[in-house]
Image: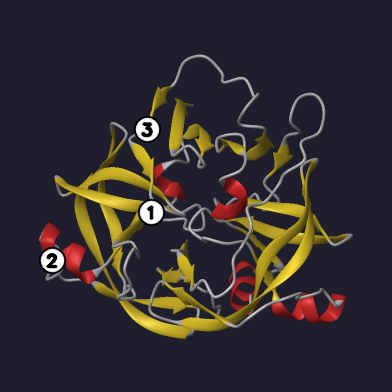
């Protein structure tokens, strides 16, 4: 059975991968990444997997070439623990931390120092969390050694061209913004980008999670408030940091974000950790895949350019 640290809904096909916020309890301070941008225009990178809507990439990690996933729902960048041990990456001064994920699962993690290169952008000495990413690799069908999280995304302008399956990272202070488009209703909350949307005509605030391929995943509390918790549904598999758990998938009549309306969408009802600040729902890339997206996570802004 494929596993993933977040949500996996099986609909006969792989219907939803992601769900991704996880919180690292701060026993160690993660210093802000310090990206070094190349001179000239930022370099486009193709999505490494054309069969997935997730943002997949090939990255340089400590002088090695690895597979990576760009996951705005992960508060911190994480590196596969086996890769850390195999490459002998240094921990430095590090204390154990608890990483909590959607579904209530968790892992004990340590921080490590890595040198990251992605599309010409270099981040030497990046502090990352060493986690077991075996589940991510099994779900995607390839070895994944790196999850690029909000800590990195908050220091760059992420230019996400979903229709053309490519992206690039630029300096948010100097990168030109294309004309046209419109601002999406989002804001920053701590180490997260929050989308202001409606579900069943009820306002909801959802974590923007590029680690999820679905429209929406919500907590039981949110599902009850929207009046869909008691609807007949089907059983799905929620695959979390701590293992695999069951989830209920129901159909919502209406979802709207940034003026775009979707009808009759599958909505997994997922367990959320009872932790202050943890989101009550998440919004995946299905809500963005018809747009060219400029994500300035550090400033809490997002601009959409319809395809």
Q: SS class of the residue under badge 2?
A: helix
Point out the tag, 1 or 2, that comes first from the N-terminus.
Answer: 1
When the figure is inspected, residue 173 is found, relative to residue 206, above or below; the finding is above
Residue projecting furthest to the right:
63
Q: Nearer the viewer, residue 207 or 192?
A: 192
Which residue is tagged 2? 224
Residue 173 in the figure: left or right of residue 63 = left
Please name the residue shown 67% across and 77% down the image: 94
Looking at the picture, how far across and down is residue 32, in whole percent?
63, 53
Q: Nearer the viewer, mark 3 or mark 2?
A: 3
Looking at the picture, how far across and down is residue 289, in whole percent?
48, 41
* Structural crowding at the residue carrying mark 2, measured as other residues with C-alpha within 10 Å and reported as few (<14), some (14–19) or many (≥20): few
Q: Nearer the viewer, residue 253 or 102?
A: 102
Looking at the picture, how far across and down is residue 3, in whole percent?
54, 78
Please name the residue shown 80% across and 24% down the image: 40
Answer with the quarter of the image where residue 228 lies.
bottom left
Residue 149 in the figure: left or right of residue 64 = left
Q: SS class of the residue under badge 3?
A: loop
* Residue 135 visible in the picture: yes
Q: CA distance from mark 1 to mark 2?
A: 18 Å
When the figure is inspected, residue 55 is found, relative to residue 250, above or below; the finding is above
Q: Nearer the viewer, residue 57 or 74?
A: 74
* Residue 52 visible in the picture: no
Point out the tag, 1 or 3, that comes first from the N-terminus.
Answer: 3
Which residue is tagged 3? 184
Disc 1 to disc 3: CB gap under 8 Å: no
Which residue is tagged 1? 207
Q: Nearer the viewer, residue 244 or 186?
A: 186
């Amino acid at each position: 059975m494929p596993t993933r640290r977040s949500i996996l809904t099986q609909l006969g096909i792989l219907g939803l991968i992601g769900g991704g916020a996880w919180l690292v309890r701060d026993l160690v301070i993660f210093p802000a990444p310090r990206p070094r941008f190349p001179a000239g225009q930022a370099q486009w990178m193709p999505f490494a997997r054309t069969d997935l809507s997730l943002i997949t990439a090939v990255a340089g990690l400590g002088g090695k070439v690895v597979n990576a996933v760009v996951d705005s729902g992960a508060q911190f960048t994480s590196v596969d623990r086996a890769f850390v041990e195999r490459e002998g990456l240094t921990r430095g001064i590090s204390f154990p931390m608890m990483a909590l994920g959607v579904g209530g699962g968790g892992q004990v993690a340590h921080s490590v120092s890595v040198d990251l290169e992605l599309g010409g952008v270099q981040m030497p000495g990046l502090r990352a969390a060493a986690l077991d990413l075996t589940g991510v690799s099994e779900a995607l069908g390839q070895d994944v050694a790196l999850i690029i999280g909000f800590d990195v995304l908050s220091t760059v302008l992420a230019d996400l061209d979903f229709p053309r399956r490519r992206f690039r990272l630029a300096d948010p202070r100097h990168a030109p913004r294309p004309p046209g488009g419109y601002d999406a209703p989002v804001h920053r909350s701590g180490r997260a980008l929050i989308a202001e949307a409606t579900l069943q005509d009820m306002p909801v605030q959802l974590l923007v999670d590029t680690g999820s391929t679905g429209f929406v995943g919500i907590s039981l509390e949110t599902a009850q408030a929207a009046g869909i918790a008691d609807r007949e549904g089907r059983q799905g598999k929620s695959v979390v940091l701590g293992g695999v758990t069951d989830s209920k998938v129901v159909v919502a009549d209406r979802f709207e974000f940034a003026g775009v309306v979707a009808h009759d969408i599958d909505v997994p009802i997922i367990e959320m950790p009872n932790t202050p600040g943890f989101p009550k729902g998440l919004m995946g890339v299905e809500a963005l895949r018809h747009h060219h997206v400029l994500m300035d996570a550090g400033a809490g802004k997002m601009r959409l350019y319809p395809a």
